[in-house]
Image: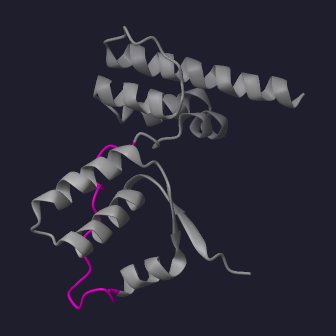
Amino acid sequence: MARSVKSLSGADKNAYIARVVRDELGAEHALAEKVIDRLGDEVTRLWVKVEALIDETAGSRDSGPPEPAIGHDEFDPFRPNVVVELRRHGREGAMAALSSIQAVDQLKRLAREQQLGIDPALHHAEDVRLAILAAAERRVAGRRAAAS
């Protein structure tokens, strides 16, 4: 049985919100960008009917070319998923994935969104990466202990 809804998060969620708001308010409407930014910040996940996504990809809402996805250049605090990287690729793989993020504020946001508790007083990117990795290791160890 095919699913009738799809969960959207991250860049896909932001692109969907931007498309719908611009369709309803108009791309030139000043309020549209405010609403898009606020919903993008406050909404973490959407459940959308698959038909709405088919309309989006087919371009049936407007006759022009499909609008480029919004948010693909923005930082996604859920990528990489540190716990998954740690479990699949070990400590070195997780650290390699984190090394692609240079900004301390982005690393702290990743930790906050993935609920990896770190010391907020850390100010160097390498220190924040190590703290994130330690928090992910604690989570994996806690899950293993709970499972046994």
Considering depth in this image, is 85 or 33 the residue closer to the camera? 33
Left/right of residue 123 with respect to residue 80 in the rendered view: left
- Magenta stretch: residue 67 in it? yes
- Relative placement, left or right, of 20 versus 119 is left
Predominant SS of the magenta segment:
loop
Q: Percent from the top left, x then y, of residue 90?
A: 62, 31
Relative image position of residue 62 (x, y in whole percent): 25, 87
Quarter of the image where the N terminus is located: bottom right
Which quadrant holds residue 137?
top right
| 132 vs 13, nearest the viewer | 13
Percent of width and height locating residue 61: 31, 86
In the picture, the quarter occupied by the C terminus is: top right
Tell me the magenta residue range. 59-76
Q: Quadrant of residue 67?
A: bottom left
- From this viewpoint, which residue is outermost toward the top? 121
Residue at 83% from the left image edge and 26% from the top image edge: 146
Residue found at x 20% / y 87%? 64
Whether residue 77 is in magenta: the answer is no
Q: Could you tell me which residue is drawn at 38 percent across and 17 percent down?
A: 126
Q: In the image, is residue 27 above or below residue 43?
A: below
Q: Residue at x 35, y 57 (%)?
A: 14
Whether 60 is drawn above or below 12: the answer is below
* Color scheme of the displayed model: one colour
* 126 over 80 or under it: above or below: above
